[in-house]
Image (cartoon, grey):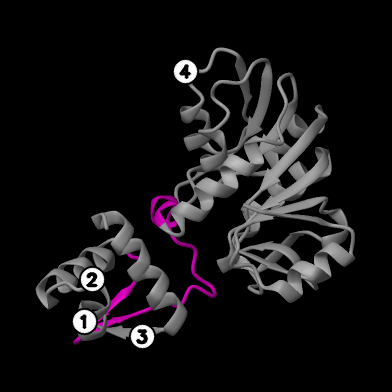
Amino acid sequence: MFLQERREQIITLVEQVGRISVADLSERFGLSQATIRTDLDALAASGLLVRTHGGAVALDRSDLELSFDVRRRLHSEQKDRIGAAAAAMIEDGEAIILDASTTALALATQIKGRSELTVLTNCIRIALALLDTPDITVLMPGGFLRRDSISLVGAEGHDFVEQFNFQKGFFGAKGLTLEEGLTDVNSAEVVIKRDLVARAKQVIAIVDSSKWGRVGFVSFASIGQMDCVITDEGAPHDMVAALQGAGVNVIIA
């Protein structure tokens, strides 16, 4: 097992059980406790867990917005699969929306060979990822820079977004529930997300299974506004069935 893969599994384990010991991880991975301590120290330094005496505990992320780079490393394998499945839905010549989520960035890396695409995004990282793709036109709204999400937000982008119509919009989220729909933690980010949702003929949620059943501070799309959810095999079966019953297509990547 590669170092990065092991550390991602450690993060997943800690999130699942809340607390884990060096001894338990050492036995699980068949590695020395010194190696496990090094892993936990590195993950704690990256803000992915909290180091404790003898082990680690999960971060309380209920009201916490992690930085873009930290979020990008969480559930990265699932995000790559979701991004690939979402990219398969995009046809040459379409106009699409990619929000400022790390899963949307995973999608963006999968469409670099497409022709005559128009991509609207408020994510600077996505714009940079598409910088070397002359067949893809990138549109960006105005606004001010949010450093945590590396995105442009603010009322300045509203009129710009209102000019256009898009075949598909792809949206990450802090949480997904049947009652609150898609939610996020930052109100400024939610304002631009709502504008983008309104301009997309198809609203497609790209959320890994860790987001199901969680609720962020503000809703930006109801279940009734969503056409499709792309997720991974860890999504709860009862919620998947409920969404399908509500007419939302669910794709397991």
State the SS at label 1: helix
Residues in magenta, as a range? 47-73
Q: Is residue 58 above or below residue 156?
A: below
- Residue drawn 60% across the image and 63% down it: 233
Instruction: Name the amino acid, label 3.
Output: Arg
Instruction: Name the amino acid, label 2.
Output: Leu
* Numbered badge on residue 22: 1
Q: Is residue 148 shown left or right of residue 134?
A: left
Q: Earlier in the sequence, mark 2 or mark 1?
A: 1
Q: Position of residue 84 (x, y in %)?
A: 58, 40
State the SS at label 3: strand
State the SS at label 4: loop
Per the image, the residue denoted by label 3 is 19
Residue 58: quadrant of the picture: bottom left
Q: Position of residue 33 (x, y in %)?
A: 13, 77
Asked whether residue 4 is in view, the answer is: yes
Asked whether residue 153 is in view, the answer is: no
Alpha carbon distance from label 1 to label 3: 10 Å
Instruction: Name the amino acid, label 1.
Output: Val
Q: Position of residue 1 (x, y in %)?
A: 27, 58
Alpha carbon distance from label 4 to label 2: 37 Å
- Other-residue count near label 1 (Cα within 10 Å), few / some / many at <14 / 14–19 / ≥20: many
Q: Is residue 30 shown left or right of residue 68?
A: left
Q: Is residue 168 above or below residue 14?
A: above
- Other-residue count near label 4 (Cα within 10 Å), few / some / many at <14 / 14–19 / ≥20: few
* Numbered badge on residue 132: 4
User: Do callouts 2 and 3 mark residues in contact (Cβ within 8 Å)?
Assistant: no
- Other-residue count near label 2 (Cα within 10 Å), few / some / many at <14 / 14–19 / ≥20: many
Per the image, the residue denoted by label 2 is 40
